[in-house]
Image (spheres, helix red, strand yellow):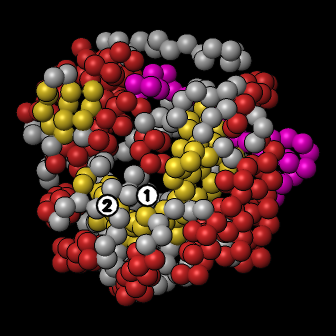
Amino acid sequence: MTGAFARRQFVVPWQGCRPIDEAAIDATLDFIFGTPRTEPTVAYVHVPYCQNHCLFCGFFQNVWRPEASAAYVADVVAEMERVAGTPLVASGPIEAVYIGGGTPSALHADDLMVLVESLGRILPLAPDCEITVEGRVHDFGLSKAVAALDAGANRVSLGIQSFDTRVRQRLGRKASGREARAFLADLVGLDRAVIGCDLIYGLPGQDDAVWRADVEAAIELGLHGLSIYALNVWPGGPLSRAIDNGKLPAAGPLPAQATAYAHAVETLTAHGWRQISQAHFARSPRERNRYNRLIKEGANCLAFGPGAGGHAHGFRWRNTVDIARRRALVAQGRRPIEGLSRLPVLHRARTAVVSGLEDGDLDIEAVEAAAPGFLRVAAPLLADWVDAGLGEMRSGRFRTTRAGAFWMTTLATGLHAVLDRLVPTESRPEGAPA
């Protein structure tokens, strides 16, 4: 559990993608948006603003300005309307929508309401579509949450990270732990939506007692879902600099993180929570965690808003991040899309590896079917992992132990390295530009 590897490795979703030549970009986008989809599909709406840059976060883009709210929503609604009639968007139901960021809850209540309402008005949402609004405690408020629910949202996910006020303040969180607990309790008390939050273990100053209190607080609140994540210290990022400069204590070492993970799993399951993925737990059957599960399984993703990433038909892309440039491109009649690339060779096999390990039950034969030769090359590695207590082989499946679940991203990286050794067999998607 604590010493299987010297460090954790992380799967980069875009690793191995092959950029599309500039001369072929327009034709490729015509193919993507002009081709109906047949696979499960989700949508992601990106709100690229934050009140401040929290030290642990690697996704900060723009400082929030209240006057940006209405213009941002108008831009995204217009974007959805421009593509609503394309075969890519109109050809089937969207099973889950995630409004993330950034900080979606920074939007004014009326604007957030317009954004959520527009999803159901413009996009072909499934009747039981999961619509999640991500947020933070500061500047959210119950009235704004109610506005989002009135507009059609049915799930709220709050980035809490810790309920300990001192730990929160060190990270750049403005609300106290008491305020965070009170707001979550109010949301749960409404009984109108699935309510969940994120906790991070390994934070500076978060000792064993603080982490145990964080887990207990989440249980006591009666949340429907809970995600627990290991701290990532991005090299050169603000948290890394603060630690290196002595402004913050060191992050929790790997053995302590492993112990924290094991404690959380044991405690949550003892209280009747179901572990539905490596990092996510559900107390209530109302919590489906639909968006996250489908993304890990390789569902198509329709992207809206500056900086949102999408993928379909064997390609991935990112909406233009710079808001001024995005508006200029739209004014010129051009698509505000950048970073267009072909998905990695053996993408389906890579997705099967990640989703299987996330669930703790990897179907080796399914990966072999997508990447012939996988089992032969992976067999020694899987045998080593079984010997190390990270999993067991049973009926053609690799089932992770609790230790294997903690090291899941490192295991996925190892199996992706196996796939890299195989002779590429994928051809370009049928009908796609060369």
**Disc 2 residue type (three-letter):** Ser
Residue depicted at x 43% and y 81%: 186
Tell me the quarter of the image containing the C terminus.
Answer: top right
Q: Which mark is residue 111?
A: none
Can you give x and y, in whole percent of width and height, for residue 347 in the image? 47, 26
Quadrant for residue 116, please give it.
bottom right
The region drawn magenta spans 324-350
SS category of the residue bearing label 1: loop
Q: Which residue is mark 1?
A: 234
Judged from this view, the residue extending furthest toward the front is 127
For label 2, the crowd category at 10 Å Cα-Cα, with few meaning under 14, some 14 to 19 and many 20 or more, is some
Q: Earlier in the sequence, mark 2 or mark 1?
A: 1
Can you give x and y, in whole percent of width and height, for residue 388 in the image? 10, 38
The reply to whether residue 359 is in sight is yes
Q: Is residue 362 above or below residue 408?
A: above
In the displayed structure image, the side of residue 136 where residue 62 appears, left or right: right
Residue depicted at x 29% and y 65%: 201
Residue depicted at x 64% and y 38%: 317
SS category of the residue bearing label 2: loop
In the displayed structure image, the side of residue 176 where residue 316 appears, left or right: right
Q: Which residue is mark 2?
A: 284
Q: Nearer the viewer, residue 298 or 373?
A: 298
**Disc 1 residue type (three-letter):** Trp
Q: Is residue 426 above or below residue 323?
A: above
Residue depicted at x 34% and y 75%: 162
Q: Is residue 387 magenta?
A: no
What number of labels is visible?
A: 2
- Could you tell me how far apart the alpha carbons at marks 2 and 1 are, in whole angstroms? 34 Å
Quadrant for residue 393, please give it.
top left
